[in-house]
Image (cartoon, helix red, strand yellow):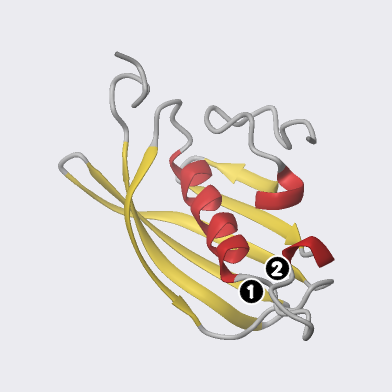
């Protein structure tokens, strides 16, 4: 497993950037990550990348936009707009859109060059302690 891709990250420190994306830019309330897709991500003989890898990139970008130690995903609305083939590079841009009470809404887009391949809204929560802590 690769090392964390950005020392400024405060959450999800054990993520493998080869599977979930590498941080390109991290600012308060926003993040940009890239994923170079590979043959291990293929779903079929046409080299279609399984959507779970694209979703994982988008989810990780949302977590990085919030960038708080205990942030978790509560819900997501997503649209897969175009297929991605193994060997292609995709870039996720995430930004906090709004906060309502305990909910943090993060808008995420994923592009392959100029082509929009995915968009979604991620509802995040920042609990006071890790969700697996007793």
Classify 20 as above or below 119.
above
Q: Which mark is residue 90?
A: 2
- The image quadrant that residue 49 belongs to is bottom right
State how far apart marks 1 and 2 are (Cα): 5 Å
Element type at mark 2: strand
Classify 32 as above or below 111.
above
- Closer to the camera in the image, 40 or 86: 40
Residue at the spot x=53%, y=75% of the render?
Answer: 118
- Residue 18, given in percent of the width and then of the height, sits at 76, 49
- Closer to the camera in the image, 11 or 8: 11
- Residue 63, given in percent of the width and then of the height, sits at 48, 44
- The image quadrant that residue 47 belongs to is bottom right
Residue at the spot x=56%, y=50% of the render?
Answer: 31
| Contact (Cβ within 8 Å) of mark 1 with mark 2 | yes
- Residue 112, given in percent of the width and then of the height, sits at 70, 76
Q: In the current view of this chain or complex, which residue is farthest to the left?
A: 101
Question: Which residue is denoted by mark 1 in the rendering?
Answer: 111
């Amino acid at each position: 497993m690769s090392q964390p891709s950005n020392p400024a990250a405060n959450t999800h420190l054990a993520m493998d950037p080869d599977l979930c994306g590498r941080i390109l830019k991290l600012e308060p309330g926003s993040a940009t990550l890239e994923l170079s897709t590979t043959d291990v991500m293929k779903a079929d003989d046409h080299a279609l990348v399984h959507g779970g890898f694209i979703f994982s990139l988008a989810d990780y970008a949302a977590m990085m936009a919030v960038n708080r130690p205990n942030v978790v995903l509560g819900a997501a609305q997503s649209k897969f707009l175009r297929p991605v083939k193994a060997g292609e590079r995709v870039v996720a841009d995430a930004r906090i859109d709004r906060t309502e009470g305990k909910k943090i809404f993060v808008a995420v887009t994923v592009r392959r060059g100029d082509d929009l391949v995915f968009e979604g809204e991620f509802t995040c929560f920042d609990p006071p302690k890790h969700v697996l802590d007793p």
